[in-house]
Every structure is written in structure tokens, then in C-alpha cells.
Amino acid sequence: MNPLLNKLQPYPFEKLRKLFSDITPNAAYPAISLGIGEPKHPTPVFIRQAVTDNLGGLANYPSTIGSEALRSAIAGWLERRYNLPKIDAASQVLPVNGSREALFALAQTVIDPTGDALVMCPNPFYQIYEGAAYLAGAQPYFVNSDPARNFAPDYKSVPADVWPRVQLLYICSPGNPTGAVLTLDDWKELFELSDRYGFVIAADECYSEIYFKTEAPLGGLEAAHKLGRTGFPRLIAFSSLSKRSNVPGMRSGFVAGDAEVLKNFLLYRTYHGSAMSPSIQAASVTAWSDEEHVAENRAKYVAKFSQITPMLQEVLDVQLPDAGFYLWAKVDQHGGISDTDYARRLYAEYNVTVLPGSYLAREAHGVNPGQNRIRMALVAEVDECFEAAKRIVEFTKKLS
């Protein structure tokens, strides 16, 4: 067996199941889970219809590069969403089966494992980044998020001798779990570092369409264009329909950016067998071409967060995020309780599941930046999230 598999850590939800394994939750309360970031809003009817209308595509082998119609729809969305000049749908866009598999696979394409390669990740982070690094023959290097910088990673803290070894840098903006969005200055710093050391930037932007301010979050391709970076050198942006359109089961997303990197990524994917079903491609064209359902979905999140965040602020150190559908709350102000103990007791006494923040991070540079925080995914309908918030408030007041 591949010995690199031994480096993989259990996924956060495996750790959560183990944490709760000896608990029988209070049966007086129906179970509510805020633990998993799986969209629960209904899938739009027109997307469901588009899938069934195109089932004839099941009779055909799909091409890895995807249909011209899908690549053109994605390119058009990018141009509209980020005010970009013409995107070459033939060379700068590639459909993928959700951002997760593409985030993993990109590392297998760009990493040269013959040396001492590093893959730089934010901390806390999406665990796929770490697994992708190990299985590509590299080592992850974690850059802790800084609460004083709106949870942006502090790249100035990275020692000078680390940067020459970096071959791939993952960034998540809007961030999971913090919801933080990188500024244009943040991107400028990353681009300058990429120019100096030659690493590829993988910009995970799957939460980009759920936000709470008037202005939509800045994207990596948008930042590159604003900074005059023609052709998006060494930059690949990732997005998907899962959260934007409430279709996580479709496994439909894209990568876009540097044509030379994508040319090699397409070669890898051709052998890897990562082509998207023609039926899903056709439905994806429909989804990427419509914004009305996206605005309606976003309005639901705005309504939930505007109602629930103030409730939780009465008892927890938590702020409205820039974007995304998570609340990232500090809990240790209540008698020094840890994030894992908080999650265990909340589940046992009130049958509400939250994810300990330490499960989403690694100890790096002497600290686990997720320690004593919890992540709450407000993905259910507003009534269920409101009920969960009421129970969390009641539980936390008991701690005080």
C-alpha cells in the first residue's frame, strides 16, 4: 500500500463521532446539527428539471474538457461576476466534479516530489489541502490565521528560508471556517511572493456567493485583473455550484486561470478519469446562467445571520463574518471550557451538534488557532437555526 496514506489524519467528522460515541443526547430535544457545512436550502426546481430533461446524456461518454456550452457559461459568469475582460473558455476554464476533487488533484499536477517541496495552507483549513500535500509527496506548512487581521494568514511570519521550498499555496477566501475575505492588499502580497518564488496559488472560492455586505467578495482573478496581471500567471481559482445553487449532490464546479497550468491539469485529469456527466454539464449551464436563484438563496442567509448572530453574541465571542455560512465563536471565556468539552456538553444536554474548532486546525508554531472555538454551520432553514441558537444561549448561560 502507498505509505503516504499513513500520514492522513481522520477527517473532522470522524473525530466528532468519536467524541460523541459515549453520549446519549437529551431525548427531550429533537436533534439539530450545525456541524456539517452541507447546504440544506431546497434545490431550485429549474435546476432539477434541467437534470431530468438531459438524461439522454447518460448514453454518451463525456469529454474531460467539458462541453463548449458549459465552458462558455462559466466564462460568461466569471466575466459578469468579477468584471473581467474576455475569458478564453477553451484554455482558461475547465469543468470539475466539485471543487473538492479538483483541489486535491491540482497538487498531484503541480508538485515535483523529488525534492523537499512544501504546500502552504492557512490554519485553520479545509483538510483536503493537507491530504493533497501528503499524497503528492510534499509536506504541508501551516500559516496561522490572525484574529487581529480579520483571520487572514500572517505571511510575514513565514521565515525566509521556507519560501523557496513552496510549490503550491492554498488560500480559502471567503474562508472556512472564519468567513474572512482577502483584501486587494492581501492578494498583492501573495502575487509578489508567487512572482519571487514561482509557486502556484490555488484560490478556493466556493463560498463567494454567500455574503452579508453590499459589495460582493473580491475574487483572486478579479484581484489579478485589478493589479494588471495579464493571463493570471500561476493562479487557479476554484468554485462550484454546491453552495451557490444548493446542489452539492451534482458535484459540479470549475477551475479557471493560468492557461499553461490548466493545460497540464487537463492532461492529468484525462488519465485520472475526471470527466463530468453530460447530464450534469447541461444542468450546470442552466445554473451558471441564472442569478435570480442565487440572490434569493443569499437573502435567506442574510435573514438567518441577522437574526441569530445578535442572539449568540449575548453569550459568545462571535462576529458576523464577511461571507460564507459559518459562525466562528470563541467559548473559553465561560469557566475556561474547551471547544471539545463545550461540544460534548451541548450535544448531551441540548442535542445540538457543533464542530470543535481545534478539529479544523493543526498545532503549528506553538499554537492551535482553532482551539477553544467552535464552528456553527447555519445551513438549515431559519426556524431550525433559530431553535438551535436558543438552545445554545440557554446552555451557555448555564456555564456562566
Image (cartoon, rainbow, N blue to C red):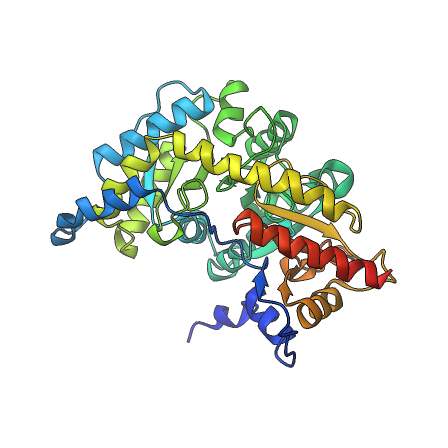
What residue appears at the point 64 percent right and 60 percent down from the top-left corner? 354
| Residue 186, horizontal then vertical, whole percent | 64, 31
Which quadrant holds residue 72?
top left
What residue appears at the point 65 percent right and 38 percent down from the top-left corner? 306
In the orientation shown, which residue stands out farthest toward the front?
A: 28
| Residue 366, horizontal then vertical, whole percent | 78, 58
Left/right placement of residue 263 relative to residue 182 reads left
Tell me the quadrant of the picture where the N terminus can be found: bottom left
- Looking at the picture, does residue 290 appear above or below residue 246? above
Left/right placement of residue 176 relative to residue 49 reads right
Residue 90 visible, this orientation: no
Front-lying residue, 400 or 66: 400
| Residue 23, horizontal then vertical, whole percent | 65, 78
Residue 308 visible, this orientation: yes
Front-lying residue, 159 or 120: 120
In the orientation shown, which residue stands out farthest toward the bottom?
A: 22
What residue appears at the point 78 percent right and 64 percent down from the top-left corner? 338
